[in-house]
Image: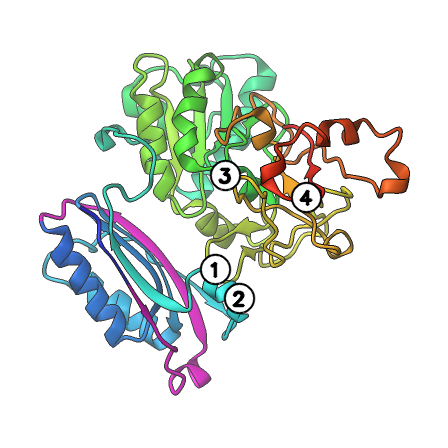
Amino acid sequence: MASTETITGTMPTSEAESEGYGVLLYYQYVDVPDDVAAADWMRRICEEQGLLGRVRVSKQGFNVTVAGSTTALHKHISSLSHHPSGWFAQTDFKLEPCDWPPEPRIARECKVDSLSVRVVKELVTLCPVDLSLTGDHLSPAEFHRCMVEGRRGENQGEDWRGARNKGRGLRKISGRRGGPVPRGMVVLDTRNVYETRIGRFVPPEGVAFIDPCIRQFSDLPAWVDRHEEELKNKTVLMYCTGGVRCESATAYLRSKGPGFQDVVQLSGGIVRYLEAFPDGGFFRGKNFVFDHRLAVPPAAPQQATIGACCLCEKPFDDYSGRKRCVACRMLLLVCPSCSEPQPQIICEICQKGSCKAEGGGMGAKEGTLKQQSQKPKEHQQENPQSQRLQQLPQQLSPSPVTLVGGL
Protein backbone atom coordinates (compact mmCIF):
# COMPACT_ATOMS: atom_id res chain seq x y z
CA MET A 1 0.00 0.00 0.00
CA ALA A 2 1.36 3.41 -0.97
CA SER A 3 0.98 6.53 1.10
CA THR A 4 1.58 10.16 0.28
CA GLU A 5 2.26 13.16 2.44
CA THR A 6 3.24 16.56 1.10
CA ILE A 7 4.51 19.31 3.34
CA THR A 8 4.69 22.80 1.87
CA GLY A 9 7.22 25.20 3.27
CA THR A 10 10.04 27.61 2.58
CA MET A 11 13.70 26.84 2.81
CA PRO A 12 15.64 28.39 5.71
CA THR A 13 17.82 31.23 4.44
CA SER A 14 20.20 32.16 7.26
CA GLU A 15 22.81 29.51 6.44
CA ALA A 16 22.23 29.48 2.71
CA GLU A 17 22.83 33.19 2.16
CA SER A 18 26.53 32.62 2.75
CA GLU A 19 26.77 28.92 1.90
CA GLY A 20 24.63 28.79 -1.23
CA TYR A 21 22.05 26.25 -2.33
CA GLY A 22 22.22 22.87 -3.93
CA VAL A 23 20.30 19.90 -5.28
CA LEU A 24 21.09 16.43 -3.96
CA LEU A 25 20.30 13.29 -5.95
CA TYR A 26 20.83 9.79 -4.66
CA TYR A 27 19.35 6.32 -4.69
CA GLN A 28 20.09 3.14 -2.84
CA TYR A 29 18.79 -0.34 -3.53
CA VAL A 30 18.69 -2.08 -0.16
CA ASP A 31 16.27 -4.35 1.69
CA VAL A 32 13.93 -2.19 3.78
CA PRO A 33 11.80 -4.41 6.05
CA ASP A 34 9.41 -1.64 7.13
CA ASP A 35 9.05 0.86 4.29
CA VAL A 36 6.38 2.93 6.09
CA ALA A 37 8.60 3.43 9.14
CA ALA A 38 11.54 4.24 6.88
CA ALA A 39 9.46 6.86 5.06
CA ASP A 40 8.46 8.46 8.36
CA TRP A 41 12.11 8.57 9.39
CA MET A 42 13.16 10.17 6.07
CA ARG A 43 10.37 12.71 6.35
CA ARG A 44 11.46 13.65 9.84
CA ILE A 45 15.13 14.22 9.01
CA CYS A 46 14.30 16.15 5.83
CA GLU A 47 11.97 18.43 7.79
CA GLU A 48 14.59 18.97 10.49
CA GLN A 49 17.16 19.92 7.85
CA GLY A 50 14.77 22.17 5.92
CA LEU A 51 14.95 20.16 2.69
CA LEU A 52 12.35 20.29 -0.07
CA GLY A 53 11.78 17.86 -2.91
CA ARG A 54 10.82 14.23 -3.54
CA VAL A 55 11.57 11.15 -1.46
CA ARG A 56 10.47 7.72 -2.66
CA VAL A 57 10.76 4.76 -0.30
CA SER A 58 9.98 1.12 -1.02
CA LYS A 59 11.01 -2.27 0.25
CA GLN A 60 13.63 -2.06 -2.52
CA GLY A 61 15.29 1.04 -1.05
CA PHE A 62 15.32 4.81 -1.56
CA ASN A 63 15.19 7.26 -4.48
CA VAL A 64 15.63 10.91 -3.50
CA THR A 65 15.90 14.38 -5.04
CA VAL A 66 16.00 17.21 -2.50
CA ALA A 67 17.07 20.85 -2.50
CA GLY A 68 18.35 22.97 0.35
CA SER A 69 21.26 24.97 1.65
CA THR A 70 24.60 23.32 0.99
CA THR A 71 25.18 23.20 4.75
CA ALA A 72 21.90 21.34 5.30
CA LEU A 73 22.60 18.97 2.42
CA HIS A 74 26.04 18.09 3.77
CA LYS A 75 24.43 17.41 7.16
CA HIS A 76 21.90 15.19 5.41
CA ILE A 77 24.64 13.21 3.68
CA SER A 78 26.58 12.82 6.92
CA SER A 79 23.55 11.68 8.91
CA LEU A 80 22.69 9.01 6.34
CA SER A 81 26.26 7.85 5.76
CA HIS A 82 26.72 7.19 9.48
CA HIS A 83 23.28 5.72 10.15
CA PRO A 84 23.59 2.49 12.17
CA SER A 85 21.48 0.58 9.62
CA GLY A 86 24.36 0.80 7.14
CA TRP A 87 21.84 1.38 4.36
CA PHE A 88 23.75 4.32 2.89
CA ALA A 89 27.35 3.28 3.54
CA GLN A 90 27.98 2.80 -0.21
CA THR A 91 25.58 5.43 -1.58
CA ASP A 92 26.75 7.76 -4.34
CA PHE A 93 25.47 11.17 -3.21
CA LYS A 94 25.39 13.61 -6.14
CA LEU A 95 25.38 17.21 -4.89
CA GLU A 96 25.26 20.05 -7.41
CA PRO A 97 24.94 23.82 -6.85
CA CYS A 98 21.78 25.63 -7.91
CA ASP A 99 20.20 29.07 -7.92
CA TRP A 100 17.45 29.82 -5.41
CA PRO A 101 14.62 30.68 -5.22
CA PRO A 102 13.28 29.20 -8.45
CA GLU A 103 10.36 30.59 -10.40
CA PRO A 104 7.26 29.59 -8.37
CA ARG A 105 5.49 28.03 -11.35
CA ILE A 106 8.45 25.80 -12.17
CA ALA A 107 9.15 25.00 -8.51
CA ARG A 108 5.55 23.89 -8.08
CA GLU A 109 5.52 21.71 -11.18
CA CYS A 110 8.91 20.15 -10.37
CA LYS A 111 7.83 19.64 -6.74
CA VAL A 112 10.66 21.58 -5.12
CA ASP A 113 8.27 23.98 -3.39
CA SER A 114 7.39 21.30 -0.83
CA LEU A 115 8.55 18.04 0.69
CA SER A 116 6.81 15.00 -0.77
CA VAL A 117 7.53 11.62 0.85
CA ARG A 118 5.83 8.57 -0.64
CA VAL A 119 5.87 4.85 -0.07
CA VAL A 120 5.93 3.13 -3.46
CA LYS A 121 6.09 -0.40 -4.79
CA GLU A 122 9.10 0.19 -7.08
CA LEU A 123 11.81 2.84 -6.92
CA VAL A 124 11.36 3.34 -10.65
CA THR A 125 8.31 2.14 -12.55
CA LEU A 126 9.36 -0.56 -14.99
CA CYS A 127 8.09 -4.10 -14.40
CA PRO A 128 8.92 -6.92 -12.00
CA VAL A 129 12.60 -7.69 -12.55
CA ASP A 130 15.31 -9.66 -10.78
CA LEU A 131 17.70 -6.92 -9.63
CA SER A 132 20.42 -9.50 -8.98
CA LEU A 133 20.88 -9.48 -12.77
CA THR A 134 21.72 -5.78 -12.94
CA GLY A 135 24.61 -4.97 -15.26
CA ASP A 136 28.12 -4.18 -14.08
CA HIS A 137 28.93 -0.56 -13.34
CA LEU A 138 31.54 1.25 -15.44
CA SER A 139 33.09 4.44 -14.13
CA PRO A 140 32.75 7.49 -16.41
CA ALA A 141 36.36 6.98 -17.53
CA GLU A 142 35.74 3.29 -18.30
CA PHE A 143 32.48 4.08 -20.09
CA HIS A 144 34.29 6.68 -22.18
CA ARG A 145 37.16 4.31 -22.96
CA CYS A 146 34.74 1.59 -24.00
CA MET A 147 33.34 3.85 -26.70
CA VAL A 148 36.84 4.70 -27.90
CA GLU A 149 37.89 1.05 -27.84
CA GLY A 150 34.61 -0.02 -29.40
CA ARG A 151 35.29 2.17 -32.39
CA ARG A 152 38.77 0.68 -32.73
CA GLY A 153 37.55 -2.91 -32.52
CA GLU A 154 34.71 -2.33 -34.97
CA ASN A 155 36.87 -0.57 -37.54
CA GLN A 156 39.57 -3.24 -37.36
CA GLY A 157 36.96 -5.94 -37.82
CA GLU A 158 38.42 -8.23 -35.19
CA ASP A 159 37.26 -9.88 -32.00
CA TRP A 160 38.03 -7.50 -29.16
CA ARG A 161 39.41 -10.33 -27.05
CA GLY A 162 42.38 -10.49 -29.39
CA ALA A 163 42.56 -6.82 -30.30
CA ARG A 164 46.08 -5.51 -29.93
CA ASN A 165 44.99 -2.26 -28.34
CA LYS A 166 42.15 -3.56 -26.21
CA GLY A 167 41.93 -1.24 -23.21
CA ARG A 168 40.86 -1.34 -19.61
CA GLY A 169 37.17 -0.76 -20.29
CA LEU A 170 36.78 -3.81 -22.51
CA ARG A 171 39.03 -5.91 -20.28
CA LYS A 172 36.63 -5.26 -17.40
CA ILE A 173 33.71 -6.59 -19.45
CA SER A 174 35.52 -9.65 -20.85
CA GLY A 175 37.22 -10.47 -17.54
CA ARG A 176 33.89 -10.79 -15.77
CA ARG A 177 33.00 -14.02 -17.59
CA GLY A 178 36.35 -15.01 -19.06
CA GLY A 179 35.08 -15.05 -22.63
CA PRO A 180 35.34 -12.90 -25.73
CA VAL A 181 33.66 -9.53 -25.84
CA PRO A 182 31.17 -9.29 -28.72
CA ARG A 183 32.56 -7.01 -31.40
CA GLY A 184 29.40 -4.97 -31.95
CA MET A 185 28.86 -2.19 -29.44
CA VAL A 186 25.61 -0.32 -28.80
CA VAL A 187 25.09 2.73 -26.60
CA LEU A 188 21.48 2.61 -25.37
CA ASP A 189 19.77 5.64 -23.84
CA THR A 190 17.15 4.49 -21.32
CA ARG A 191 15.60 7.94 -20.79
CA ASN A 192 12.39 9.44 -22.14
CA VAL A 193 12.31 11.09 -25.53
CA TYR A 194 11.78 14.59 -24.13
CA GLU A 195 15.05 14.12 -22.23
CA THR A 196 17.06 12.88 -25.19
CA ARG A 197 15.81 15.74 -27.35
CA ILE A 198 18.03 18.24 -25.55
CA GLY A 199 21.08 16.11 -24.79
CA ARG A 200 22.53 12.66 -25.38
CA PHE A 201 25.70 10.76 -26.13
CA VAL A 202 27.10 10.90 -29.64
CA PRO A 203 29.48 7.93 -29.76
CA PRO A 204 32.40 7.84 -32.18
CA GLU A 205 31.91 6.35 -35.61
CA GLY A 206 31.73 2.58 -35.44
CA VAL A 207 29.74 2.52 -32.19
CA ALA A 208 25.98 2.35 -32.71
CA PHE A 209 23.58 4.56 -30.76
CA ILE A 210 19.94 3.76 -30.00
CA ASP A 211 17.33 6.15 -28.69
CA PRO A 212 14.17 4.10 -28.00
CA CYS A 213 12.11 7.32 -28.17
CA ILE A 214 9.85 6.28 -25.30
CA ARG A 215 7.32 8.54 -23.58
CA GLN A 216 7.95 7.07 -20.13
CA PHE A 217 10.35 4.59 -18.56
CA SER A 218 7.68 1.91 -18.15
CA ASP A 219 7.51 1.71 -21.97
CA LEU A 220 11.10 0.44 -22.18
CA PRO A 221 10.43 -3.32 -21.67
CA ALA A 222 7.99 -3.41 -24.58
CA TRP A 223 10.54 -1.61 -26.75
CA VAL A 224 13.27 -4.08 -25.73
CA ASP A 225 10.97 -7.00 -26.53
CA ARG A 226 10.44 -5.63 -30.05
CA HIS A 227 14.12 -4.94 -30.68
CA GLU A 228 15.83 -7.95 -29.12
CA GLU A 229 17.66 -8.90 -32.30
CA GLU A 230 19.31 -5.48 -32.51
CA LEU A 231 20.78 -6.00 -29.04
CA LYS A 232 21.52 -9.72 -29.01
CA ASN A 233 25.20 -10.70 -28.97
CA LYS A 234 26.23 -7.07 -28.61
CA THR A 235 28.10 -5.20 -25.92
CA VAL A 236 25.37 -2.86 -24.66
CA LEU A 237 26.35 0.30 -22.77
CA MET A 238 23.31 1.77 -21.00
CA TYR A 239 23.02 5.16 -19.36
CA CYS A 240 20.48 7.46 -17.72
CA THR A 241 20.51 10.67 -15.67
CA GLY A 242 21.93 9.45 -12.37
CA GLY A 243 21.98 5.67 -12.62
CA VAL A 244 18.80 4.49 -10.91
CA ARG A 245 16.90 3.59 -14.08
CA CYS A 246 19.80 1.56 -15.45
CA GLU A 247 19.78 -0.72 -12.41
CA SER A 248 16.47 -2.24 -13.50
CA ALA A 249 16.88 -1.66 -17.25
CA THR A 250 20.12 -3.64 -17.45
CA ALA A 251 18.59 -6.38 -15.31
CA TYR A 252 15.61 -6.64 -17.65
CA LEU A 253 17.79 -6.95 -20.74
CA ARG A 254 20.13 -9.48 -19.10
CA SER A 255 17.11 -11.56 -18.07
CA LYS A 256 16.70 -12.39 -21.76
CA GLY A 257 19.39 -15.04 -21.29
CA PRO A 258 22.25 -16.11 -23.59
CA GLY A 259 23.30 -13.36 -25.95
CA PHE A 260 22.39 -10.61 -23.50
CA GLN A 261 25.10 -10.93 -20.87
CA ASP A 262 27.48 -8.17 -21.96
CA VAL A 263 25.26 -5.38 -20.67
CA VAL A 264 26.82 -2.66 -18.52
CA GLN A 265 25.79 0.71 -17.14
CA LEU A 266 27.34 4.13 -16.60
CA SER A 267 27.94 4.45 -12.87
CA GLY A 268 26.45 7.70 -11.59
CA GLY A 269 24.85 8.40 -14.96
CA ILE A 270 25.29 11.54 -17.00
CA VAL A 271 25.74 13.56 -13.81
CA ARG A 272 29.02 11.82 -12.94
CA TYR A 273 30.15 11.66 -16.57
CA LEU A 274 29.92 15.44 -16.96
CA GLU A 275 31.88 15.87 -13.75
CA ALA A 276 34.63 13.65 -15.15
CA PHE A 277 34.50 15.31 -18.59
CA PRO A 278 33.78 19.04 -18.09
CA ASP A 279 33.95 19.61 -21.84
CA GLY A 280 31.15 17.07 -22.31
CA GLY A 281 33.29 14.25 -23.70
CA PHE A 282 31.01 12.28 -26.02
CA PHE A 283 27.91 13.90 -24.51
CA ARG A 284 26.25 16.64 -26.54
CA GLY A 285 23.71 19.20 -25.36
CA LYS A 286 22.28 19.42 -21.84
CA ASN A 287 21.40 16.89 -19.17
CA PHE A 288 17.65 17.00 -18.47
CA VAL A 289 16.93 16.92 -14.72
CA PHE A 290 13.67 16.55 -12.80
CA ASP A 291 14.05 19.59 -10.57
CA HIS A 292 13.77 23.36 -10.98
CA ARG A 293 17.06 23.58 -12.91
CA LEU A 294 15.36 21.73 -15.80
CA ALA A 295 18.65 21.08 -17.62
CA VAL A 296 22.35 21.18 -16.79
CA PRO A 297 25.03 21.82 -19.44
CA PRO A 298 28.66 20.69 -19.20
CA ALA A 299 30.92 23.00 -17.19
CA ALA A 300 32.50 24.13 -20.45
CA PRO A 301 29.30 24.78 -22.44
CA GLN A 302 29.26 23.62 -26.04
CA GLN A 303 28.19 25.90 -28.85
CA ALA A 304 25.72 23.57 -30.54
CA THR A 305 22.11 23.21 -29.38
CA ILE A 306 20.83 19.77 -30.34
CA GLY A 307 17.20 20.41 -29.41
CA ALA A 308 14.74 22.05 -31.78
CA CYS A 309 11.37 23.75 -31.54
CA CYS A 310 8.77 21.18 -32.55
CA LEU A 311 6.92 23.74 -34.67
CA CYS A 312 9.51 25.84 -36.51
CA GLU A 313 12.50 23.47 -36.14
CA LYS A 314 14.86 26.24 -35.05
CA PRO A 315 17.50 25.25 -32.45
CA PHE A 316 15.91 25.37 -29.01
CA ASP A 317 16.35 23.40 -25.78
CA ASP A 318 14.52 25.33 -23.05
CA TYR A 319 11.63 23.56 -21.29
CA SER A 320 10.83 26.49 -18.98
CA GLY A 321 7.73 27.29 -21.06
CA ARG A 322 6.31 23.92 -19.89
CA LYS A 323 4.46 23.29 -23.16
CA ARG A 324 2.85 19.85 -23.32
CA CYS A 325 1.01 17.51 -25.64
CA VAL A 326 -2.71 18.11 -25.11
CA ALA A 327 -3.37 14.35 -25.13
CA CYS A 328 -0.65 12.70 -23.01
CA ARG A 329 0.89 15.80 -21.34
CA MET A 330 4.42 14.97 -22.47
CA LEU A 331 6.79 17.95 -22.44
CA LEU A 332 7.42 19.58 -25.80
CA LEU A 333 9.98 22.10 -27.02
CA VAL A 334 8.19 25.21 -28.25
CA CYS A 335 10.22 28.37 -28.78
CA PRO A 336 8.91 31.82 -27.70
CA SER A 337 8.12 32.80 -31.29
CA CYS A 338 5.79 29.81 -31.66
CA SER A 339 4.25 30.08 -28.19
CA GLU A 340 1.81 32.88 -29.00
CA PRO A 341 -1.02 32.39 -29.38
CA GLN A 342 -0.99 29.41 -27.00
CA PRO A 343 -0.44 26.39 -29.27
CA GLN A 344 -2.27 23.12 -28.76
CA ILE A 345 -0.10 20.29 -29.96
CA ILE A 346 -0.48 16.54 -30.42
CA CYS A 347 2.88 14.81 -29.98
CA GLU A 348 4.24 12.29 -32.47
CA ILE A 349 3.77 9.39 -30.03
CA CYS A 350 0.05 10.03 -29.57
CA GLN A 351 -0.33 10.26 -33.34
CA LYS A 352 0.53 6.59 -33.51
CA GLY A 353 -2.85 5.93 -31.90
CA SER A 354 -1.63 5.19 -28.39
CA CYS A 355 0.29 6.83 -25.57
CA LYS A 356 2.69 3.88 -25.70
CA ALA A 357 5.76 4.62 -27.77
CA GLU A 358 6.72 2.50 -30.74
CA GLY A 359 10.25 3.81 -30.32
CA GLY A 360 13.28 4.14 -32.51
CA GLY A 361 15.82 1.52 -33.46
CA MET A 362 19.47 1.18 -34.32
CA GLY A 363 20.91 4.48 -35.41
CA ALA A 364 17.99 6.63 -34.24
CA LYS A 365 18.92 10.19 -35.02
CA GLU A 366 19.96 12.19 -31.98
CA GLY A 367 16.60 11.97 -30.25
CA THR A 368 15.27 14.79 -32.43
CA LEU A 369 12.15 14.78 -34.54
CA LYS A 370 11.03 15.87 -37.95
CA GLN A 371 8.62 18.54 -36.85
CA GLN A 372 5.75 20.05 -38.76
CA SER A 373 3.72 23.11 -37.94
CA GLN A 374 0.18 24.21 -38.60
CA LYS A 375 0.30 27.24 -40.91
CA PRO A 376 -1.97 30.26 -40.47
CA LYS A 377 -5.38 29.74 -42.04
CA GLU A 378 -4.62 31.82 -45.11
CA HIS A 379 -1.82 29.38 -46.02
CA GLN A 380 -3.58 26.10 -45.32
CA GLN A 381 -5.30 25.38 -48.62
CA GLU A 382 -2.38 23.36 -50.03
CA ASN A 383 -1.01 22.11 -46.72
CA PRO A 384 -1.59 18.34 -46.33
CA GLN A 385 -1.24 18.81 -42.57
CA SER A 386 -4.62 20.57 -42.51
CA GLN A 387 -6.25 17.40 -43.83
CA ARG A 388 -4.82 15.43 -40.91
CA LEU A 389 -6.03 18.01 -38.43
CA GLN A 390 -9.61 17.48 -39.58
CA GLN A 391 -9.37 13.85 -38.43
CA LEU A 392 -8.49 14.68 -34.81
CA PRO A 393 -11.09 13.92 -32.14
CA GLN A 394 -12.97 17.14 -31.48
CA GLN A 395 -13.11 16.47 -27.75
CA LEU A 396 -9.38 17.10 -27.39
CA SER A 397 -9.81 20.84 -27.80
CA PRO A 398 -12.23 23.34 -29.31
CA SER A 399 -9.21 25.20 -30.71
CA PRO A 400 -7.08 24.20 -33.71
CA VAL A 401 -4.59 21.48 -32.85
CA THR A 402 -1.10 21.15 -34.34
CA LEU A 403 0.48 17.78 -35.09
CA VAL A 404 4.22 17.33 -34.81
CA GLY A 405 6.12 14.94 -37.03
CA GLY A 406 6.70 11.25 -36.47
CA LEU A 407 9.68 9.60 -34.83
Q: Are marks 3 and 1 in contact (CB under 8 Å)?
A: no
Q: Is residue 202 magenta?
A: no
> Mark 4 against mark 1, which lies toward the viewer?
1
Say which residue label 1 marks.
Answer: 109
Label 4: which secondary element: loop
Compared across the picture, whether 137 is left or right of 361 comes to left
Q: Are marks 1 and 2 in contact (CB under 8 Å)?
A: yes
The residue stretch that appears in magenta: 6-33
Label 1: which secondary element: helix
Does residue 201 lie above or below 63 as drawn? above
Q: Quadrant of the C terminus?
A: top right
Amino acid on which disc 2 is placed: Arg
Compared across the picture, whether 315 is left or right of 53 comes to right
Say which residue label 2 marks.
Answer: 105
Among the 4 quarters of the image, the one containing residue 44: bottom left
Residue at (38%, 73%) from the top-left corner? 70
Say which residue label 3 marks.
Answer: 192
Residue at (38%, 77%) from the top-left corner? 11
Between the residue at mark 2 and the residue at mark 3, the CA separation in whole angstroms equals 23 Å
Of mark 4 and mark 1, the one earlier in the sequence is: 1
